[in-house]
């Protein structure tokens, strides 16, 4: 796997990450995926890690496979299955 570049996000002191930052990262990831690539986030501050986790993007932004993909898990639901 080749790495083309590393990008560093620099913000003014005292600025906390918000959902706009997460949205920007998600859009960058989407653009990368469309090009057959991916992005990875390194050395993220704790607040950004928590936000990425909250929206379900933490694993993907750390380069981990999405849930179930690494072991080939498939979920099947039967209509008669009781709700857990």
Image (cartoon, helix red, strand yellow):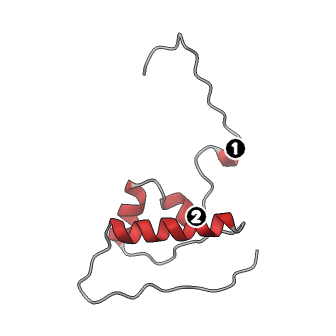
Q: Nearer the viewer, residue 20 or 70?
A: 20
* Quarter of the image that includes the C terminus: top left
Quadrant of the rendered structure where residue 75 is? top right
Left or right: where 8 falls relative to 31: left
Please indicate, yes or no, whether residue 72 appears anywhere in the rendered image: yes
Q: Residue at x 34, y 87 (%)?
A: 11
Q: Residue at x 63, y 55 (%)?
A: 65
Q: Is residue 71 above or below residue 15?
A: above
**Residue 30 numbered mark, or none:** 2
N-term mark: 2 or 1: 2
**Residue 71 numbered mark, or none:** 1
Left or right: where 57 falls relative to 75: left
Q: Is residue 66 above or below residue 28?
A: above
Residue sticking out furthest to the top: 80
Q: Residues within 10 Å of mark 2 (few under 14, many from 20)?
A: some
Residue 40, x across and y down, in percent = 57, 71
Q: Residue at x 58, y 16 (%)?
A: 78
Quadrant of the rendered structure where residue 17 is? bottom left
Residue 57, x across and y down, in percent = 48, 58
Left or right: where 33 falls relative to 24: right
Which secondary structure, mark 2? helix
Residue sticking out furthest to the left: 14
Q: Nearer the viewer, residue 20 or 10?
A: 20
Please indicate, yes or no, whether residue 62 appears anywhere in the rendered image: no
* Quarter of the image that includes the N terminus: bottom right
């Amino acid at each position: 796997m080749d790495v083309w570049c590393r990008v560093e996000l620099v913000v003014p002191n005292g600025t906390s990450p918000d959902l706009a930052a997460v949205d920007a990262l998600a859009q960058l990831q989407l653009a990368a995926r469309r090009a057959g690539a991916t992005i990875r986030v390194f050395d993220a501050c704790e607040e950004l890690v928590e936000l990425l986790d909250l929206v379900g993007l933490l694993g993907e932004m750390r380069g981990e496979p999405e849930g179930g993909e690494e072991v080939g898990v498939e979920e099947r639901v039967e209509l008669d299955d009781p709700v857990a």
